[in-house]
Amino acid sequence: MTTLTDATFVPPRIADNRRLIRIWLYVIAAMVMALVVVGGATRLTESGLSITEWKPIHGVVPPLSDTEWQEEFDLYRQIPQYQQINRGMALSEFKVIYWWEWSHRFLARSVGIAFALPLLFFWVTGRIEPWLKPRLVGLLALGGLQGGIGWWMVASGLVERTDVSQYRLAVHLTMACIILTATLWIARGLVNRPTERAPTDHSYLVGFLLVAMVLFQIYLGGLVAGLNAGLSYNTWPLMDGQVIPSNLLAMTPTWRNFFENPMTVQFVHRLGAYALLTVAILHAIAARRMAPGSHHARGATWLAVAVLAQAMIGITTLLMHVPIDAALMHQAGALVVLAGAVFHARGLFGRYPVPAAA
């Protein structure tokens, strides 16, 4: 039989404030998830280099006249992607890729505003508990850092390359997911109801492990996207006709294969998926045996189901040669799995305590 933890009474004022902040953070998390999916569409449509300047404030206004559109197009025609791949592109075609990148940046700015303004309101009205303030400021700082990483990524494709660096793309994607993880982690701890105790002392470690594995798998997915590795070796379960392909370590030095060899990167991504699915299923079986009928057992089960569904979407996307709709579904599925892993892991710790002074 499971027992409840953190049964300390939460005063109504604190409970109401936590509920408002929790709802706000969930809205931010949803916006971050949408931002990541739009970023995926930007990558898949090769639109990320269409805006060649970083204008955090002025850039919120898109071109409003034919002259302004021509100026943006002229800037794009100076970079290698246009000169080597898209030479001869019409202005109307440029507008399509421009709007994808502009939408991505606009949504990113919107997330920043949607976070900063309510944070200021909650702060000045005294609704944020002292222990929570550094956590929220930390989230704001991560958002600012992510904006810089985004431009650092774009800048890698403006001089010598025709696309962005896969290293920087993977970092940008992973940082977005770290921000999502931190946001959901804080929000999940602000629940007002008592929560069940973890089935065992090791449950916390497995919860952390699953979150870390999902984040690592997303990082590997960023490398796959950056190298367009999903467009090759579109068979499963064999890869290049073999269980273990023979050219995994064709590059020298060896470490480069894990970041620059499309075959190796895709193979490691596959192994990561197998490992994550195995751990999720074993964790669900253990939770159901040790704490049958508990919230944690149900959460572990649903998480395993989500990982299995995501693996199936990934395989389908690969076999279909990565159509944009399936690829975006796969990326969105990764975010759903990450959210499920964070909710499950955070639930093992119970809610945040109420300070004695309250």
Image (cartoon, rainbow, N blue to C red):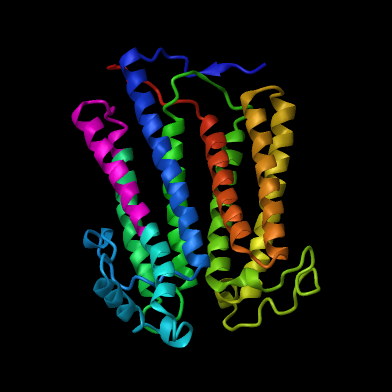
| 172 displayed left or right of 195 | left
Which residue, as the protein is rendered here, is positioned at the far left? 124
Q: Which quadrant of the structure image shows residue 138?
A: top left
Residue 182, visible in the rendered structure = no
| 188 displayed left or right of 53 | right
> Is residue 249 shown above or below 112?
below
Q: Residue at x 47, y 51 (%)?
A: 177
| 238 displayed left or right of 69 | right
> Is residue 107 shown above or below 261?
above
- Say which quadrant the N terminus sits in: top right
Observer-nearest residue: 59 or 216?
59
Q: Position of residue 131 (x, y in %)?
A: 30, 31
The span picked out in magenta is 105-134
Q: Position of residue 212 (x, y in %)?
A: 55, 49
Q: Which quadrant of the structure image shows residue 291?
A: top right
Observer-nearest residue: 12 or 245?
12
Residue 316 is one of the magenta-drawn residues: no
Q: Residue at x 64, y 39 (%)?
A: 303
